[in-house]
Amino acid sequence: MSRVHNNTAPVVRDCRTVFGATIKLTVVSAGLVLAGCASYQKDHFTVGSIPKDYRTVHPIVVSQSEQKEDLVVTRSMRSMSSRHRGVVTAMVGQFRSSGAKTLHLMLPAGSHNENAARHVGADMVRHMKFLGLTENQIKIERYHASNHGDAATIRLVYGTARAQVASECGQWGDDLGDTRENVNYGNYGCATQNNLAEMIANPEDLLGPRGVSEIDASRRDNVISDWRADGT
């Protein structure tokens, strides 16, 4: 009677040995890869798209400021001169565009030309009302001017918002050829921000949006009718 030999056990032991060696090799390889990544992060630069945005490096700042005009008044004057009229007209236009609430008319008190300034100031108020300002928008004030002699002036002044760049342009301390980190040089965008700040008609628009106005229904109907008629 012949005997049958069973070789299953040795084969299983060989597979376990090979599988164990494979796991060890995988762990060692993963360790080498992680070590290589750690070395790469340590010895190389990490770059971004644009880490230093010019809008944060050179921000536009909205601050409170005064717009003023000084007008010379002689002792013999009783009404505005043509120059006074032109200055007042321009000042009222700027005042209305700025969105300010009050235009101050400051008259000298105690000076040699006090009486003349009072007459000229009254003429200015009449001209301001002719240009569309109301009583509530004009505030007449007096300032002590006894030490000014004949040189005391009438001052027109109103408070308004002003937009300007906080930083100073023209700083060229950076090496423009060093671009390894993909970072903008320090002066980049400064002139653009300054130009934008000067072009803004009402700096308060930078602080928040304006209110939504009412819809012009008749104008909307005309536009829709024209489009339906010829497609323009």
Image (spheres, rainbow, N blue to C red):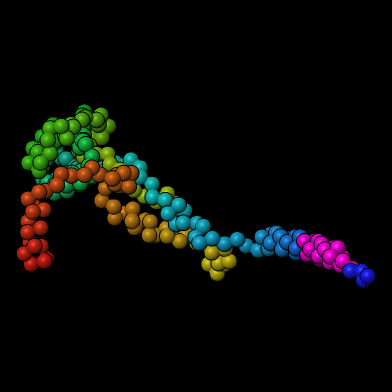
Residue 155 within the magenta-colored segment of the rendering = no
Residue 128 position by quadrant: top left
Relative side of 20 to 208, left or right: right
Identity of the residue drawn at 71% across and 63% down: 33
Identity of the residue drawn at 89% across and 68% down: 5
Q: Residue 197's x, y, as percent?
A: 33, 53
Q: Residue 86's x, y, as percent?
A: 13, 49
What secondary structure is the magenta-colored segment mainly? helix
Relative side of 227 to 7, left or right: left
The image quadrant where one finds the N terminus is bottom right
Q: Is residue 16 visible?
A: yes
How many marks can you see?
0
Identity of the residue drawn at 62% across and 62% down: 45
Residue lying farthest to the right in this orientation: 1
Foreground: 12 or 145? 12
Q: Residue 190's x, y, as percent?
A: 42, 58
Relative side of 66 to 76, left or right: right
Residue 134 position by quadrant: top left
Q: Please, is residue 69 above or below residue 32 in the view?
A: above
Q: Which residues are magenta?
A: 5-23
Q: Please, is residue 83 above or below residue 181 in the view?
A: above
Residue 135 position by quadrant: top left
Relative side of 131 to 164, left or right: left
Residue lying farthest to the bottom in this orientation: 2
Foreground: 216 or 104? 216
Foreground: 18 or 172? 18
Residue 9 within the magenta-colored segment of the rendering = yes
Identity of the residue drawn at 21% across and 44% down: 212
Q: Residue 209's x, y, as percent?
A: 28, 45
Q: Is residue 70 visible?
A: no
